[in-house]
Each structure stands twice: as structure tokens, then as C-alpha cells.
Amino acid sequence: MDSKFQVSLEKAALQHHLSREEIILLLRAQPGKEQNELFAMADRIRERYQGDEVHLRGIIEFSSYCRNDCHYCGLRCSNNNINRYRFSVEQLVNASCQAVELGYNTIVLQSGEDPWYDADSLSRLITEIKKKKNVAITLGIGERSKEEYRQLHQAGADRFLLKHETTDAELFNKLRPGTSSDKRMQCLRWLREIGYQVGSGNMVGLPGQTLESLADDILFLKELDVEMAGIGPFIPHSQTPLADVPNGDLQLTLNTLAVARLLLPYCHLPATTATGTLHPEGRQMALNCGANVIMPNVTPYDYRQLYQIYPNKAGSTDDPKQSLKKIVSIINQVGRKVSEGRGDTPKPSFQIKSQNSVFLNDKHSN
């Protein structure tokens, strides 16, 4: 194994800081000794800072309408070949209550960017859910005004998931016509300023993406100090302009996830559904290289196959109970346990370890 690779790996584990060039070096980890060392180190960092619990966050995909025309997404507004739907507030409250009854302590309310749901209606919805049980509520509804973000936070929304997709502004603007990278970054900074627990993230394998931009993605997530970072492979949809683009590379996705864990030890990292879609054991692989969250789909069965950002999503043919059972089995397979808490993220100060720390070689070090 290259000595520079080893030095960068140990520096990341000890200091949780790397230069752009050092990140790129680790992202290039090849199958075999390099990748094994990278994944093992990321897993040790995960165990040290996050423990063995895996947090479950139940996603309800409540609207497939979207005002955007992103080239990579099956929900794009110009796609006339899908059946659109919207939940009523009552339907969404009922679905949330069913998720709570299954044991979820975080509910993720996700949709396309659908302005039909204004801040007032969403605020009433959040209030109704919170009356049932004080679960953590994560919103994934896209770009809104700062005033709307503040109103929703005041209504009780705890977290907000807004992926930056890529820090390459030219690529972002090309793949998302009518939107801008600058606006996306501004929205993320508003969310941080207002006081949300902020989730962001990026895809791996977008056409035109480089290792340099992937390194910048990780550095941006660290700069923003996100509580969660969703990193998953690009998967093409047949009804988009990127239909003929190959899937994102699973190994590069896992490398990116592992490096993110090294630099973001307190951040929650999901084993994404997309990894499980590319490979039957993709989520197990992700859990073994730094991930500590899984986000099962708890959308009612009649709707879940209609929400197609990409096709053939893992678990799309299961009902919520089946999804939960399969996810618990995956967690047990890798020797982990399901968390009973909400999975809020502490922000203690990082302590830089001594270069002589036995932690680098001792998985069970305290």
C-alpha cells in the first residue's frame, strides 16, 4: 500500500481533517488492501463516535408533484408518463401515526418541490403529528423562502434534509435547469442559521463529475457542519435525459462514504436505499464502512411505487411492516442493533488524538 495513502488515512482518523488532495488520494482506494484499510478505519471511527446503534428514520413520500425539471429525476415536471399523487393532511397524519406505532422515533416527510403545500398547511400538519407523539420530524421538501423555513421550524420541525447534489456549480446548473447552485447553498445556510438539524448530501456518478468535485462535496459537508449526510450512487431513470448514463460506481460510493465518516465522526450517515438497489447487500456494505442510519420507506403501499426518483427502488414492493422487518434483519446481519432514541446529533469539540494512539490499531479502544 502506498505510504502517502497510509499517512493520509491515519491523519484523517486522528485529526478528522484532510486537504483536498489527501481526500482525493483516499477516494482512489483500490479493491484489496487499500480499500480494506479505508473501510476498517471508517468502521472504527463509526464505532468510537456513534456506537453500534443504527438509527431508523421512516420516510413518507407524500407528493410526487414537482416544479423542477432535473435531468436525473423521474419526478421531473416534464415527465408525463407517471401517475402523480398528493396526500391530504389527514392521510399524512394517519401515515405518520402508523409509522409511530411501528416504533419509529423520526418521521421524514419527503416530496417533490410541490408549492401546493404552503407553510401554513405544513405547519398545521407538523402540529397534528406532534400532538400524537413527540417524534423528531424531518422535512425534505426542497427550496423555500427563509420565512417559510422559520415558520416550519417554529411549528415543530426538527430537521431538514436538502441535498446539495454536487458542489460543482456548473454541473449543478446544467443538470437542474431553472435552478442555481448559489440558491441551494443559500437555503442550506438559512436552515443552519434558523436552528434546524441540517442534512445534505451528494450523488456519486453524475455525468461530468470528477474526484475533485467529490472531494469538494465532503469539504462542503464539513464546512456546513451537517448533522446528516446522504451519499448514494446515481441511478438513471428511463424517462429522463440521463436514461443512457451508467449507474454510479458502488465502490466509489463506498469510498466516498468512508472518507466522509473519517472527516465527519459525529455526523449521521445513511446506508442509502440506492446502495441496496445497486447491490443486494449494498446497505450491509455501507454499514460496514461508516454508515449508522437506515431510512425505511413507510409510505402506504398503494403509493410507494408511484414515487420514482429512480426505478426499481429496493423495498418498493414491500409494505411498511415488511420493510421494517427486512431492515432489522440487515442490521442484525452486521452485528448491530436498532437504536431506541431519536438520533439527535451532539456537537462536542473534536479531540485530536496523539500520533501514538493505540486507537488506530485497536477496534475496541475507548
Image (cartoon, rainbow, N blue to C red):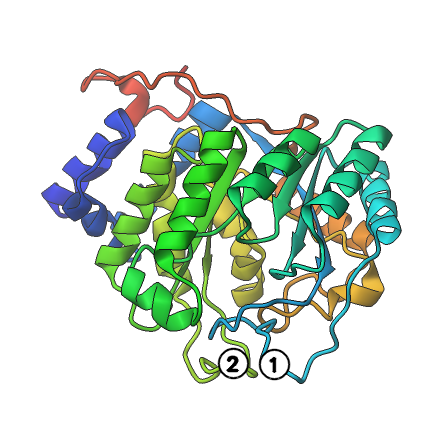
**Image-based side of 357 in relation to 269, left or right:** left
Q: Amino acid at mark 2?
A: Thr
Residue that carries the numbered disc 1 in the rendered image: 79
Looking at the image, which residue sits at the far front? 147
Q: Label 2 crowding class (10 Å Cα cut-off): few <14, some 14-19, many 20+?
A: some
Q: Is residue 60 above or below residue 54?
A: below
Q: Residue at x 59, y 68 (%)?
A: 67
**Image-based side of 84 in relation to 290, left or right:** right
**Image-based side of 209 in relation to 289, left or right:** left
Nearer-the-camera pick, 107 or 44 = 107
**Image-based side of 311 in relation to 222, left or right:** right
From the top left corner, tell me how far across and down residue 268 is, in percent. Answer: 50, 36
Q: Residue at x 61, y 52 (%)?
A: 141
Q: Is residue 84 visible?
A: yes
Q: Is residue 240 above or below residue 141?
A: below
From the top left corner, tell me how far across and down residue 153 is, in percent. Answer: 62, 33
Circles 1 and 2: CB atoms closer than 8 Å = yes
Helix, strand or loop at mark 2:
loop
Q: Is residue 199 above or below residue 17?
A: below
